[in-house]
Amino acid sequence: MNLQIRNLRKTYPNGVKALSGIDLEVKKGMFGLLGPNGAGKSTLMRTIATLQLPDEGSISFQGIDVLKEPLALKALLGYLPQDFGVYPNMSAEALLDMFALLKGVSSRKERRLVIGKVLELTNLTEVRKKHVSGYSGGMKQRFGIAQLLLNNPSLIIVDEPTAGLDPAERSRFLNVLRDIGIENTVLFSTHLVADVEELCHDLAIINSGTVLLHDTPTNILQGLAGKIFSKAIEKEDLPFFHERFSILSSSYNQDNSLQIRAYLKEESEGFERAQPNLEDAYFIALSQESSTPINRLT
Ligand code: ADP
């Protein structure tokens, strides 16, 4: 197994239980870590990246005991934190050259080669002479990926990279990640279901430091087949439906009526069967949240 996380626990000194016994197995490819703000995603990612220690538990990656051999893991790791990037007035190319030197690539020729490659992979070749401080949010995020690729990592961790990106930048960024995820293990956190839907072969939904669901999008959607229903209602009737049905979400129609989505074990009068999506699974997982983790939707 590629990345294996066992019984990871962390309580911060202020008493906040950020990780309450996380178990996860992550294979090669794009893995989505989905959860609301405060779920524990960053804590988990920083712990895997050996930037902080858990109170309990173990992590192994390709046979490395990560907590015991952090330097061995670091040699294989590329990590993009949530907040990064105050840049001096330097071009992307010059900055990457400096980072590559710091990462120990001493040969100038080798640096030129690897920098050319990472600029190409992140679609930044054309703007390589521009100052990174003047880059747009999406370009900065892609530059973050370029710098983490310099040492050719096999485990890549990116913490909420799409937050604040406009739709075009987000799409360009996800395409870069998609390419990188073919050959590597990429752990990617987000609170946007759509990010995971577009990108990931495997996903975990976490909240309150617990894994609520871990499965492939295909299995999750198959598990919900025939159980998601939809209905147009008057806005005033929403409390009535909330009392009687598991309402997952609602959105307004053009005529100002509400379209509700419900999770029903069987057909109910007035409801129409709807195509399940990952957002349904996300809301079901969060609403079923309990101290016992579930591995499959029931
Ligand atoms: P996410 O990345 O999913 O938003 P975090 O891992 O950042 O979640 O946070 C999980 C919980 O731990 C939150 O309640 C947060 O407020 C708390 N937390 C995170 N970092 C610290 C810290 N350094 N000290 C105390 N509490 C923290």
Image (cartoon, rainbow, N blue to C red):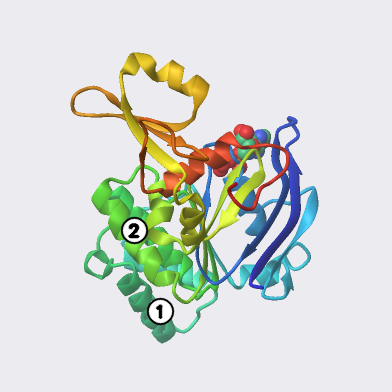
Q: CA distance from mark 2 to mark 1?
A: 20 Å
Q: Secondary structure at mark 2?
A: helix
The numbered mark at residue 173 is 2
Query: Is the residue 16 above or below the residue 133 in the image?
Result: above
Residue 161 horizontal/vertical position (percent): 43, 51
- In the rendered structure, which disc, 2 or 1, sits on the residue that comes first in sequence? 1
Q: Quadrant of ligand 1?
A: top right
Q: Is residue 163 above or below residue 64?
A: above
Q: Residue at x 55, y 76 (%)?
A: 104
How dense is the environment of label 2, judged by Cα within 10 Å: few (below 14), some, or many (20 and up)? many
Question: Residue 267 location, x and y as percent?
Answer: 44, 38
Check disc 1 and give the amino acid type.
Val
Q: Nearer the viewer, residue 126 or 106?
A: 126
Which residue shows up at 61% across the image and 72% down it? 75
The residue identified by callout 1 is 114
Going 29% across and 56% down the picture, which residue do you hit?
171
Question: Dividing the image into 4 quarters, which one contains the N terminus?
Answer: bottom right
Q: Circle 1: is it few (<14), some (14-19), or many (20+) Cα within 10 Å?
A: many
Seen in the picture, residue 270 relative to 157 is either above or below; the reply is: above
**Left or right of 243: which side holds 75?**
right
Nearer mark to the viewer, of 2 and 1: 2
Place residue 64 in its image quadrant: bottom right
Q: Measured along the vertical axis of the image, is residue 245 above or below residue 75?
A: above
Given residues 278 and 223, the one toward you in this image is 223
Residue 75 is tagged as none
Q: Position of residue 229 (x, y in %)?
A: 40, 39
Amino acid at dot 2:
Phe
Is 172 left, or right, of 25 in this rendering? Answer: left
